[in-house]
Image: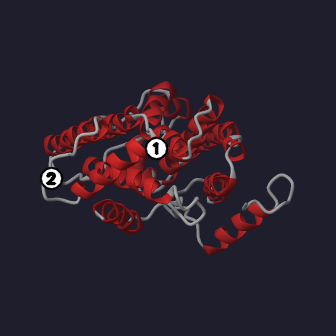
Amino acid sequence: MVADAAYAACRRLARRHYENFPVASRLLPKAMRPHVAAIYAFARTADDFADEGDVPADERLRRLDDWGRRLEAAAEGRAPAPVGDDGDMVFQALAGTIRECRLDPQLLFDLLSAFRQDVLVGRYDDWPDLLDYCRRSANPVGRLVLQIADIRDAAAAESSDALCTALQLTNFWQDLTRDWRKGRVYLPASVLQSCGADEADLAAGALTPAWKSALGYASGYTRRLFDQGRPVADAVPGRLRLELRATWLGGVRILDRLEAVDYDVFARRPTLGWRDAAAIGMKLVVWKDGSMLVR
């Protein structure tokens, strides 16, 4: 069937990309995996459009606008006109997921608005500016996953927002040098100014004490968001609970690794390996009451 082929294409795209955290992994309920893969394929491709730094900004924005028009068709239940690219399969799958899971299409449009912002904006003045970006770049993913699971509780959604923002911020601190080379600095200017951090120092290829201080402050801010996001990992049932707990533990462990290297991401970019996976697995087993979590 065409739908099966479309979801299979989305899963292949998901497997081709490296991420810190699992996408449509085997921890998820089997029925959710194709739908999560469809969301991921849509978002990952659009994010790639925004990140193609060697492509002129006008062309990147044009590609995002085209993605938006195809999303409009899928959201309205119309078959997007085939254009002969990988997006044909992505939008076939996405249209089915929107319909079957009763997704709020605005969450998908919010993602696109954040990707456009990545093309146009490279600096953030303060936390509210950065958090508004995360509201559109990260939080929709968590809410979409909850909707796929048919969890529409307001408290779970708010906790999910905190977790997704924390994961997004962790990725920013982890990728500080990579993003800077792309012309982006996500640490708010207000934090840099209060710590005395100067962007000119990054060109030297080493983090100064001022930059480490700024990242330390940002890490503490992020940990508080992880604390606020922890309840969503207890608010969902079955295998999704296991997936969200593993995601929460993985994000916190990256922050631990950042602290361990004194935030010097020039010297070493913290990543998770098999030893981390084993440690996370042990913590999953003893989460809260020590019982096994898979039902």
Q: Mark 2 = which residue?
A: 82
Disc 2 residue type (three-letter): Pro
- Element at label 2: loop
Q: Quadrant of the C terminus?
A: bottom right
Residue 224 spot, x, y in % from top left: 68, 37
- Element at label 1: helix
Asked if 115 appears above or below 270 in the picture, the reply is above
Residue that lies at the very extreme toward the right in this rendered image: 289
Q: Tell me the mark number nearer the camera, choosing from 2 and 1.
A: 1
Residue that lies at the very extreme toward the bottom in this rendered image: 274
| Residue for point 28% across, 62% down | 2
Q: Mark 1 = which residue?
A: 101
Disc 1 residue type (three-letter): Cys
| Residue for point 58% across, 59% down | 29
Q: How packed is label 2: few (under 14 Cα within 10 Å), some, or many (20 or more)?
A: few
Asked if 2 appears above or below 102 in the picture, the reply is below
Residue 264 spot, x, y in % from top left: 55, 56
**Which sits in the foreground, 257 or 160?**
160
| Residue for point 44% across, 27% down | 129
Q: Is residue 187 left or right of residue 261?
A: left
The answer to whether residue 210 is seen in the rendering is no
Residue 28 spot, x, y in % from top left: 58, 59
Asked if 206 appears above or below 232 in the picture, the reply is below
Instruction: State how far apart marks 2 and 1 are (Cα).
Output: 23 Å
